[in-house]
Image (tube, rainbow, N blue to C red):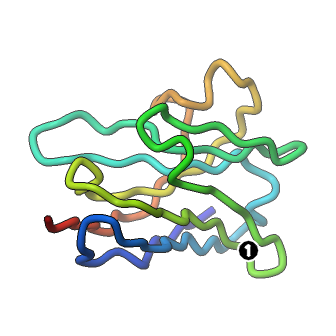
Amino acid sequence: VQLQASGGGLVQAGGSLRLSCAASGRTVSAYTMAWFRQAPGKEREFVAAIRRFGGSTAYADSVKGRFTISRDNAKNSVYLQMNSLNNEDTAVYYCAGSMTNILSTIARRASYEFWGQGTQVTVSS
């Protein structure tokens, strides 16, 4: 599966952005899909995931209550709605796909076989 992320940009603190990840080659419902992010000088970290069976979701504590991951099978896309953005959310955001459905593994970068290119999100104060 090929993944194409988009929707990043510059936003003021407290604002919102919606990231999109368009898939081609296979349907996104066949994969656990996730968003990761990488800030300058930091490791790539897990943000959110939506599981391949059932569609249950998981979030990093730092974004819980502010970010929402969703999937549109008809558009073969995954989205990340980001609200109440703050400076710590500034990063390059990556979408990723995995065949795993094991809850204990979906936050691990190594679990994901497929990656899109990143999209930059910059939050200004």
Screen quadrant of the C terminus: bottom left
Give whichever of 10, 112 is nearer the camera.
10
Left or right for 41, reference 13: left
Q: Amino acid at mark 1?
A: Asn
Q: Position of residue 92 (x, y in %)?
A: 28, 58
Left or right for 35, reference 85: right
Q: Residue at x 83, y 79 (%)?
A: 74
Q: Tell me which corner region of the image, top left, top right, bottom left or bottom right, holds residue 107.
A: top right
Give whichever of 54, 85 is nearer the camera.
85
Q: Secondary structure at mark 1?
A: loop
Outermost residue on the left side: it is 41
Outermost residue on the right side: it is 54
Outermost residue on the top side: it is 104
Screen quadrant of the N terminus: bottom right
Residue at image mark 1: 76
Give whichever of 73, 63 is nearer the camera.
63
Q: Position of residue 124 (x, y in %)?
A: 15, 68
Q: Residue at x 76, y 32 (%)?
A: 101
For residue 122, above or below residue 39: below
Left or right for 76, reference 18: right
Q: Position of residue 61 (x, y in %)?
A: 48, 31
Q: Residue at x 35, y 74 (%)?
A: 8
Q: Position of residue 53 (x, y in %)?
A: 87, 43
Q: Tell me which corner region of the image, top left, top right, bottom left or bottom right, holds residue 91.
A: bottom left
For residue 85, above or below residue 40: below
Q: Residue at x 82, y 71 (%)?
A: 73
For residue 15, above or below residue 70: below
Left or right for 84, reference 78: left
